Image (cartoon, rainbow, N blue to C red):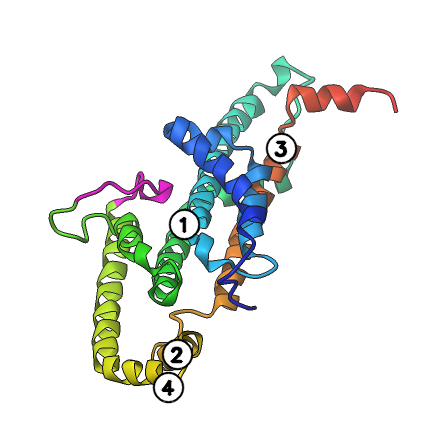
Protein backbone atom coordinates (compact mmCIF):
# COMPACT_ATOMS: atom_id res chain seq x y z
CA UNK A 1 0.00 0.00 0.00
CA UNK A 2 1.46 3.35 -1.02
CA UNK A 3 1.76 6.52 1.02
CA UNK A 4 -0.65 9.09 -0.39
CA UNK A 5 1.32 12.12 0.72
CA UNK A 6 -0.26 14.08 -2.14
CA UNK A 7 -3.95 13.85 -2.98
CA UNK A 8 -6.79 15.73 -4.59
CA UNK A 9 -7.83 17.92 -1.67
CA UNK A 10 -10.98 19.14 -3.41
CA UNK A 11 -12.17 15.58 -3.90
CA UNK A 12 -11.92 14.75 -0.18
CA UNK A 13 -12.40 17.98 1.73
CA UNK A 14 -16.19 18.46 1.55
CA UNK A 15 -17.15 15.39 3.55
CA UNK A 16 -14.64 16.12 6.32
CA UNK A 17 -15.61 19.79 6.45
CA UNK A 18 -19.16 18.61 7.08
CA UNK A 19 -17.97 16.44 9.98
CA UNK A 20 -16.01 19.39 11.38
CA UNK A 21 -19.06 21.67 11.16
CA UNK A 22 -21.08 19.14 13.16
CA UNK A 23 -18.43 19.01 15.87
CA UNK A 24 -17.96 22.78 16.01
CA UNK A 25 -21.68 23.49 16.30
CA UNK A 26 -22.48 20.90 18.97
CA UNK A 27 -19.36 18.95 19.91
CA UNK A 28 -21.01 17.14 22.82
CA UNK A 29 -23.62 15.57 20.56
CA UNK A 30 -21.63 15.36 17.34
CA UNK A 31 -21.44 11.59 17.42
CA UNK A 32 -25.19 11.21 17.72
CA UNK A 33 -25.89 13.57 14.81
CA UNK A 34 -23.56 11.99 12.26
CA UNK A 35 -25.20 8.88 10.72
CA UNK A 36 -23.05 5.75 11.17
CA UNK A 37 -23.03 4.98 7.43
CA UNK A 38 -21.70 8.49 6.76
CA UNK A 39 -18.90 8.13 9.33
CA UNK A 40 -17.89 4.64 8.15
CA UNK A 41 -17.71 5.93 4.58
CA UNK A 42 -15.60 8.94 5.59
CA UNK A 43 -13.24 6.73 7.57
CA UNK A 44 -12.68 4.19 4.82
CA UNK A 45 -12.30 6.97 2.26
CA UNK A 46 -9.08 7.99 4.04
CA UNK A 47 -7.75 4.44 4.11
CA UNK A 48 -8.63 3.38 0.55
CA UNK A 49 -7.48 3.12 -2.18
CA UNK A 50 -4.33 4.30 -0.40
CA UNK A 51 -3.73 5.68 3.07
CA UNK A 52 -3.87 9.52 3.03
CA UNK A 53 -1.46 10.30 5.88
CA UNK A 54 -2.22 14.02 5.71
CA UNK A 55 -5.80 13.32 6.83
CA UNK A 56 -4.93 11.39 9.98
CA UNK A 57 -6.44 14.17 12.17
CA UNK A 58 -9.75 13.70 10.30
CA UNK A 59 -9.37 9.94 10.69
CA UNK A 60 -8.90 10.30 14.46
CA UNK A 61 -12.16 12.22 14.80
CA UNK A 62 -13.99 9.69 12.63
CA UNK A 63 -12.68 6.84 14.80
CA UNK A 64 -13.81 8.66 17.95
CA UNK A 65 -17.33 8.71 16.49
CA UNK A 66 -17.07 5.03 15.56
CA UNK A 67 -16.15 4.18 19.15
CA UNK A 68 -19.14 6.21 20.36
CA UNK A 69 -21.36 4.03 18.16
CA UNK A 70 -19.70 0.94 19.65
CA UNK A 71 -20.20 2.11 23.23
CA UNK A 72 -23.83 2.96 22.50
CA UNK A 73 -24.29 -0.53 21.03
CA UNK A 74 -22.81 -2.06 24.20
CA UNK A 75 -25.17 0.01 26.37
CA UNK A 76 -28.15 -0.96 24.20
CA UNK A 77 -27.10 -4.62 24.48
CA UNK A 78 -27.04 -4.39 28.27
CA UNK A 79 -30.53 -2.87 28.31
CA UNK A 80 -31.77 -5.59 25.93
CA UNK A 81 -30.47 -8.33 28.25
CA UNK A 82 -32.29 -6.76 31.18
CA UNK A 83 -35.58 -6.71 29.26
CA UNK A 84 -34.93 -10.28 28.07
CA UNK A 85 -34.64 -11.46 31.67
CA UNK A 86 -37.76 -9.54 32.67
CA UNK A 87 -39.99 -10.80 29.85
CA UNK A 88 -38.69 -14.37 30.17
CA UNK A 89 -40.34 -14.38 33.59
CA UNK A 90 -43.48 -12.54 32.44
CA UNK A 91 -44.03 -14.42 29.17
CA UNK A 92 -47.35 -15.91 30.28
CA UNK A 93 -48.81 -12.41 30.69
CA UNK A 94 -48.16 -11.56 27.02
CA UNK A 95 -48.31 -14.55 24.68
CA UNK A 96 -47.38 -12.35 21.69
CA UNK A 97 -44.05 -11.35 23.22
CA UNK A 98 -41.04 -12.47 21.16
CA UNK A 99 -37.79 -13.17 23.00
CA UNK A 100 -34.27 -13.24 21.63
CA UNK A 101 -32.99 -16.60 20.41
CA UNK A 102 -30.06 -18.32 22.10
CA UNK A 103 -27.81 -17.31 19.19
CA UNK A 104 -28.89 -13.67 19.43
CA UNK A 105 -28.33 -13.70 23.17
CA UNK A 106 -24.78 -15.02 22.75
CA UNK A 107 -23.98 -12.25 20.27
CA UNK A 108 -25.30 -9.54 22.57
CA UNK A 109 -23.50 -11.00 25.58
CA UNK A 110 -20.27 -11.04 23.57
CA UNK A 111 -20.61 -7.31 22.87
CA UNK A 112 -20.77 -6.63 26.61
CA UNK A 113 -18.02 -9.10 27.51
CA UNK A 114 -15.65 -7.68 24.88
CA UNK A 115 -16.27 -4.03 25.77
CA UNK A 116 -12.95 -3.45 27.57
CA UNK A 117 -10.97 -5.37 24.95
CA UNK A 118 -12.52 -3.41 22.08
CA UNK A 119 -11.97 -0.09 23.86
CA UNK A 120 -8.28 -0.94 24.38
CA UNK A 121 -8.02 -1.88 20.72
CA UNK A 122 -9.43 1.56 19.84
CA UNK A 123 -6.97 3.43 22.09
CA UNK A 124 -3.95 1.54 20.78
CA UNK A 125 -4.96 2.30 17.20
CA UNK A 126 -5.38 5.98 18.11
CA UNK A 127 -1.93 6.03 19.70
CA UNK A 128 -0.30 4.45 16.67
CA UNK A 129 -2.00 6.88 14.31
CA UNK A 130 -0.72 9.83 16.34
CA UNK A 131 2.84 8.51 16.16
CA UNK A 132 2.56 7.79 12.44
CA UNK A 133 1.26 11.29 11.73
CA UNK A 134 4.17 12.85 13.63
CA UNK A 135 6.56 10.73 11.54
CA UNK A 136 4.85 11.90 8.36
CA UNK A 137 4.87 15.58 9.36
CA UNK A 138 8.63 15.75 9.94
CA UNK A 139 9.28 15.68 6.17
CA UNK A 140 5.84 16.70 4.86
CA UNK A 141 5.10 19.99 3.04
CA UNK A 142 2.97 20.97 6.05
CA UNK A 143 5.78 20.28 8.55
CA UNK A 144 5.16 23.75 10.03
CA UNK A 145 2.01 22.25 11.61
CA UNK A 146 3.99 19.73 13.69
CA UNK A 147 3.85 21.75 16.93
CA UNK A 148 0.08 22.26 16.63
CA UNK A 149 -0.57 18.55 16.10
CA UNK A 150 1.80 17.55 18.91
CA UNK A 151 -0.31 19.69 21.25
CA UNK A 152 -3.51 18.11 19.89
CA UNK A 153 -2.17 14.59 20.45
CA UNK A 154 -0.34 15.30 23.72
CA UNK A 155 -1.93 18.35 25.42
CA UNK A 156 0.44 20.17 27.73
CA UNK A 157 3.58 18.92 25.98
CA UNK A 158 4.76 22.53 25.59
CA UNK A 159 5.24 24.06 29.07
CA UNK A 160 3.49 27.40 29.36
CA UNK A 161 1.27 26.73 26.34
CA UNK A 162 -1.57 24.63 27.72
CA UNK A 163 -3.92 24.77 24.73
CA UNK A 164 -6.88 22.33 24.91
CA UNK A 165 -7.00 19.74 22.15
CA UNK A 166 -9.98 19.88 19.79
CA UNK A 167 -9.73 16.19 18.90
CA UNK A 168 -12.70 14.10 20.01
CA UNK A 169 -10.70 11.14 21.27
CA UNK A 170 -9.20 13.29 24.07
CA UNK A 171 -12.58 13.59 25.80
CA UNK A 172 -13.33 10.99 28.45
CA UNK A 173 -9.98 9.18 28.52
CA UNK A 174 -9.56 6.98 31.59
CA UNK A 175 -6.45 7.20 33.77
CA UNK A 176 -5.00 4.07 32.16
CA UNK A 177 -5.69 5.46 28.68
CA UNK A 178 -4.02 8.74 29.60
CA UNK A 179 -1.02 6.70 30.72
CA UNK A 180 -0.88 4.99 27.32
CA UNK A 181 -0.84 8.39 25.61
CA UNK A 182 1.78 9.72 28.05
CA UNK A 183 4.07 6.78 27.23
CA UNK A 184 3.48 7.46 23.53
CA UNK A 185 4.48 11.10 24.07
CA UNK A 186 7.73 10.11 25.79
CA UNK A 187 8.51 7.77 22.89
CA UNK A 188 7.67 10.52 20.42
CA UNK A 189 9.74 13.12 22.30
CA UNK A 190 12.86 10.92 22.31
CA UNK A 191 12.42 10.20 18.60
CA UNK A 192 12.10 13.90 17.71
CA UNK A 193 15.28 14.66 19.68
CA UNK A 194 17.10 11.94 17.70
CA UNK A 195 15.82 13.40 14.42
CA UNK A 196 16.85 16.92 15.42
CA UNK A 197 20.37 15.73 16.29
CA UNK A 198 20.64 13.85 13.00
CA UNK A 199 19.51 16.91 11.03
CA UNK A 200 22.09 19.09 12.77
CA UNK A 201 24.82 16.59 12.02
CA UNK A 202 23.85 16.50 8.33
CA UNK A 203 23.27 20.24 7.93
CA UNK A 204 26.63 20.82 6.22
CA UNK A 205 26.02 17.85 3.95
CA UNK A 206 22.64 19.30 2.97
CA UNK A 207 24.23 22.65 2.11
CA UNK A 208 26.70 20.88 -0.17
CA UNK A 209 23.86 18.99 -1.86
CA UNK A 210 22.03 22.25 -2.53
CA UNK A 211 25.12 23.57 -4.31
CA UNK A 212 25.34 20.51 -6.56
CA UNK A 213 21.65 19.65 -7.07
CA UNK A 214 18.38 21.40 -7.71
CA UNK A 215 16.12 22.06 -4.72
CA UNK A 216 13.85 19.18 -5.77
CA UNK A 217 16.76 16.76 -6.10
CA UNK A 218 18.22 17.82 -2.77
CA UNK A 219 14.83 17.35 -1.09
CA UNK A 220 14.47 13.88 -2.63
CA UNK A 221 17.98 12.96 -1.41
CA UNK A 222 17.10 14.21 2.09
CA UNK A 223 13.85 12.22 2.11
CA UNK A 224 15.68 9.05 1.13
CA UNK A 225 18.42 9.56 3.74
CA UNK A 226 15.80 10.30 6.40
CA UNK A 227 13.80 7.13 5.71
CA UNK A 228 16.93 5.01 5.66
CA UNK A 229 17.91 6.38 9.08
CA UNK A 230 14.38 6.49 10.50
CA UNK A 231 12.05 3.84 9.04
CA UNK A 232 8.30 4.24 9.69
CA UNK A 233 7.25 3.28 13.24
CA UNK A 234 4.64 0.85 11.92
CA UNK A 235 3.77 -1.06 8.80
CA UNK A 236 1.03 0.91 7.08
CA UNK A 237 -0.44 -2.27 5.64
CA UNK A 238 -0.75 -3.84 9.09
CA UNK A 239 -2.20 -0.66 10.60
CA UNK A 240 -4.81 -0.33 7.85
CA UNK A 241 -5.66 -4.03 8.23
CA UNK A 242 -6.08 -3.48 11.98
CA UNK A 243 -8.37 -0.52 11.29
CA UNK A 244 -10.40 -2.57 8.81
CA UNK A 245 -10.94 -5.25 11.47
CA UNK A 246 -12.04 -2.67 14.03
CA UNK A 247 -14.44 -0.94 11.61
CA UNK A 248 -15.92 -4.27 10.50
CA UNK A 249 -16.44 -5.32 14.13
CA UNK A 250 -18.34 -2.17 15.06
CA UNK A 251 -20.33 -2.10 11.83
CA UNK A 252 -21.46 -5.71 12.39
CA UNK A 253 -22.54 -4.81 15.92
CA UNK A 254 -24.72 -1.97 14.66
CA UNK A 255 -26.25 -4.00 11.83
CA UNK A 256 -27.05 -6.97 14.07
CA UNK A 257 -28.70 -4.80 16.69
CA UNK A 258 -30.73 -3.09 13.97
CA UNK A 259 -31.78 -6.53 12.71
CA UNK A 260 -32.68 -7.72 16.22
CA UNK A 261 -34.52 -4.52 17.15
CA UNK A 262 -35.85 -2.88 13.96
CA UNK A 263 -37.37 0.57 14.29
CA UNK A 264 -41.08 1.22 13.83
CA UNK A 265 -40.42 2.61 10.33
CA UNK A 266 -38.60 -0.57 9.30
CA UNK A 267 -41.42 -2.75 10.65
CA UNK A 268 -43.99 -0.67 8.77
CA UNK A 269 -42.10 -1.14 5.48
CA UNK A 270 -41.90 -4.88 6.08
CA UNK A 271 -45.70 -5.03 6.46
CA UNK A 272 -46.33 -3.39 3.10
CA UNK A 273 -47.40 -5.73 0.29
CA UNK A 274 -44.84 -6.34 -2.44
| Circle 1 or circle 2, nearest the eye | 2
In the picture, measured across the screen, residue 206 lies left or right of residue 141, that is: left
119 lies left or right of 45: left
Reading the chain from its start, which is encountered first: label 3 or label 2?
A: 2
Looking at the rendered structure, which numbered label has been put on residue 258? 3
Residue at 47 percent across and 44 percent down: it is 62
Q: Which of marks 4 and 3 is nearer the N terminus?
A: 4
- Residue on which disc 1 sits: 57
* 3 or 1: tag closer to the N-terminus: 1
Q: In this view, does 27 lie above or below 122?
A: above
- The part of the chain drawn in magenta is 162-174
Sequence-earlier tag: 1 or 2 = 1
The residue carrying pointer 4 sits among few (fewer than 14), some (14 to 19) or many (20 or more) residues within 10 Å by Cα, namely: few
Q: Nearer the viewer, residue 246 or 100?
A: 246
Q: Which residue is drawn at 52% across and 24% down?
A: 83
Which image quarter is the C terminus in?
Answer: top right
* Residue 165: x %, y % from top left: 28, 43
User: What residue does disc 4 label?
Assistant: 212
User: Regarding mark 1 in the picture, which secondary structure is present there?
Assistant: helix
Query: Does label 4 or label 2 sit earlier along the sequence?
Result: 4
Which of the two marks, 3 or 2, is nearer to us in this view? 2
Residue 243 visible in image = yes
Residue 69 image position (x, y, % from top left)? 49, 37
Q: Is residue 187 above or below residue 83?
A: below
Q: How far apart are marks 4 and 2 (CA)?
A: 8 Å
Dot 3 falls on a residue whose secondary structure is helix
Q: Quadrant of residue 181?
A: bottom left
> Quadrant location of residue 139?
bottom left
Where residue 11 appears, as percent x and y from the top left, is 59, 48
Amino acid sequence: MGMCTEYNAEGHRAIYDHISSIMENEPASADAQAPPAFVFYATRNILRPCFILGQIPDLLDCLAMVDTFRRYAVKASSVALSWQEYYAKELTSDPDMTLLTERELRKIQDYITNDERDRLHHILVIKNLCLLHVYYLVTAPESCMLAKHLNDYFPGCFPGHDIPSKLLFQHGLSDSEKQIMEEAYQECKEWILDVTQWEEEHEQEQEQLLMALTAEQADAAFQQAFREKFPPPFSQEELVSDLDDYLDTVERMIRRLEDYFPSAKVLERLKRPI
